[in-house]
Image (spheres, grey):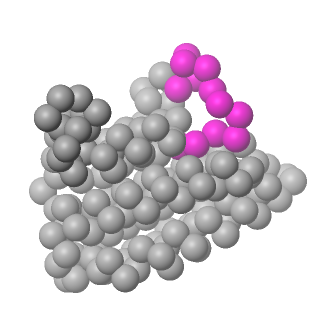
């Protein structure tokens, strides 16, 4: 893909953990087609897998009648993934940092921490049942990331 024209996809899946691998494979295939480095592909894979597993397990409570919608846009400079579940949402700021104190030994919050660590932008909707993640081929400066957050 040398023209810079984005490749877009929209996927709607039932809330079953068995769909995670197929969704990841479909989106990562688009990313690989743009020539992103293996490190970028690994990072997106990890964040995508965590976000989708969270939407299925925590958002939709493994209810197969509830859907998760994933929208993806990939171009030569970045990948953007938006994901929304049908759950009641959560406050991401209320999830404790898994690296601190007693949280070090608790399983909660590690997925969110990994998503923030591997993606350049991670922004939740107001309700807390949707997330927008962006990873750039070239790491942005903090001003560019702040602009992306504001547009989000």
Residue depicted at 58% across the width and 67% down the height: 27
Q: Find residue 69 and report its horizontal and vertical position in percent.
A: 37, 67
Residue depicted at 28% across the width and 33% down the height: 99
Q: Find residue 103 and report its horizontal and vertical position in percent.
A: 18, 38
Residue depicted at 71% across the width and 34% down the height: 138
Q: Find residue 66 and report its horizontal and vertical position in percent.
A: 21, 76
Residue depicted at 23% across the width and 38% down the height: 104
- Taking depth in this image into account, of 151 and 41 the one nearest to the observer is 41
* Image position of 87 with respect to 17: above or below: above
Do we see residue 151 in this rendering?
no
Farthest right residue in view: 2
Q: Left or right? Give the position of 127 relative to 67.
A: left
Q: Report which quarter residue 98 is drawn in.
A: top left
* Image position of 142 with respect to 117: above or below: above
Question: Which residue range is magenta in the image?
Answer: 134-145
Number of numbered discs on residues: 0
Q: Is residue 93 a member of the stretch shown in magenta?
A: no
Q: Report which quarter residue 101 is drawn in.
A: top left
């Amino acid at each position: 893909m040398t023209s810079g024209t984005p490749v877009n996809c929209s996927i709607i899946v039932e809330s079953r953990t068995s769909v995670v691998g197929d969704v990841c494979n479909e989106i990562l295939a688009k990313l690989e087609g743009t020539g992103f480095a293996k490190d970028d592909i690994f990072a997106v894979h990890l964040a995508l897998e965590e976000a989708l597993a969270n939407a299925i397990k925590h958002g939709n409570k493994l209810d197969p009648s509830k859907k998760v919608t994933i929208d993806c846009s990939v171009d030569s400079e970045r990948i953007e993934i938006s994901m929304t579940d049908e759950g009641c949402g959560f406050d991401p700021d209320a999830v404790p940092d898994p690296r601190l104190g007693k949280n070090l030994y608790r399983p909660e919050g590690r997925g969110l921490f990994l998503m923030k660590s591997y993606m350049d932008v991670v922004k939740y909707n107001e309700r807390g049942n949707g997330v927008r993640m962006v990873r750039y081929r070239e790491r942005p400066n903090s001003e560019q990331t702040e602009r992306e957050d504001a547009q989000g």
